[in-house]
Amino acid sequence: MSNDSYVTDDGRTIGPTVMEMKNITLRFGGVKAITDISFDIREGEIRAIIGPNGAGKSSMLNVISGFYVPQEGEVWYKGAKRPPMKPYQVAGQGIARTFQNIALFEGMTVLDNVMTGRLRQMKANIFEQAIWKGKAEREEVENREKVERIIDFLEIQAIRKTPVGRLPYGLKKRVELARALAAEPSILLLDEPMAGMNVEEKEDMSRFILDMNDEFGTTIALIEHDMGVVMDLSDRVVVMDYGKKIGDGTPDEVRNNQDVIDAYLGVAHD
């Protein structure tokens, strides 16, 4: 665990370790999805988790977000060991995520979908919300302002009143990112944010991720198959293969790691 901060070549400050995965092992019956993996995530960085299909990447993201509880190992968050938690409890700690398969409310507008990301910040009770006076009204106005800022930031103003079900795939992915960002997460988990996108959509999403990290200071951990995107975006990369960690370091270090090269080229395993 590192408590030292440093400034990147592009002027961003990377802070101390905010999350640490220690010797994580996850089994489904007799099958090991993750085997004794350790790595950390530092405040303010973009941390990528990569690997071939079936490497265990999404399982690791599900451990971080509380969907899975590992049989062995520990999750440390902000210097404290995290007990087994439900996903809503993990969200309450300030960890938000997007999903590989889009999980939006198709019949609701873009604005209403993004507003659901603010539920954790809304404290008014049912009675106050019903009469919509005082605290409830102030909360609504304050949360709406923050949501509108995110909508502007992600350049989806023109579709803010459009039902999500009418949107093309690329815009749905952007709306899901907006909803996650609306929760003001200290760590944002992105599960294949560019899957199924064309080149132009990937360029837009890459720009938004970099700007989000820079402007909001959001710590980001992402899974992505596009190696070009990963190497351009990430400060550090952890590489998984068959549930094991085979590489961890800067993009250049990972790019030149022979085990990583072998895994992506399909070299036979002993």
Image (spheres, grey):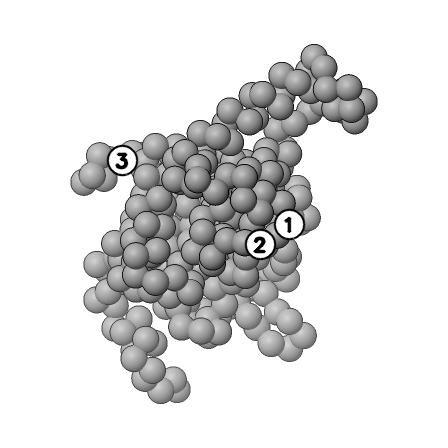
Of the two numbered discs 2 and 3 on the same chain, state the one appearing first in sequence. 3
Going by the image, does 253 lie left or right of 126?
Answer: left
Q: Amino acid at mark 3?
A: Arg
Return the mark for residue 12.
3
* The image quarter in which residue 231 lies: bottom left
Crowdedness near tag 1: few (<14), some (14–19) or many (≥20) residues, C-alpha within 10 Å: few
The kind of secondary structure element at disc 1 is loop
Going by the image, does 37 lie left or right of 203?
Answer: right
Residue identifier under label 1: 107
Whether residue 19 is visible: no
Image x and y of residue 201, in percent: 35, 55
Going by the image, does 253 lie left or right of 122?
Answer: left
Whether residue 175 is visible: yes
Quadrant of image for the N terminus: top left
Of the two numbered discs 3 and 1 on the same chain, state the one appearing first in sequence. 3
The kind of secondary structure element at disc 2 is helix
Residue identifier under label 2: 165
Q: Amino acid at mark 1?
A: Gly
Q: Nearer the viewer, residue 120 or 105?
A: 105
* The image quarter in which residue 255 lies: bottom left
Q: Disc 3 vs disc 1: which is toward the camera? A: 1
Q: Residue at x 72, y 15 (%)?
A: 133
Above or below residue 263? Residue 118 is above
Image x and y of residue 53, in percent: 44, 73
Q: Nearer the viewer, residue 149 or 73?
A: 149
Image x and y of residue 190, in percent: 46, 52
Of the two numbered discs 2 and 1 on the same chain, state the one appearing first in sequence. 1
Crowdedness near tag 3: few (<14), some (14–19) or many (≥20) residues, C-alpha within 10 Å: some
Q: Residue at x 29, y 34 (%)?
A: 13
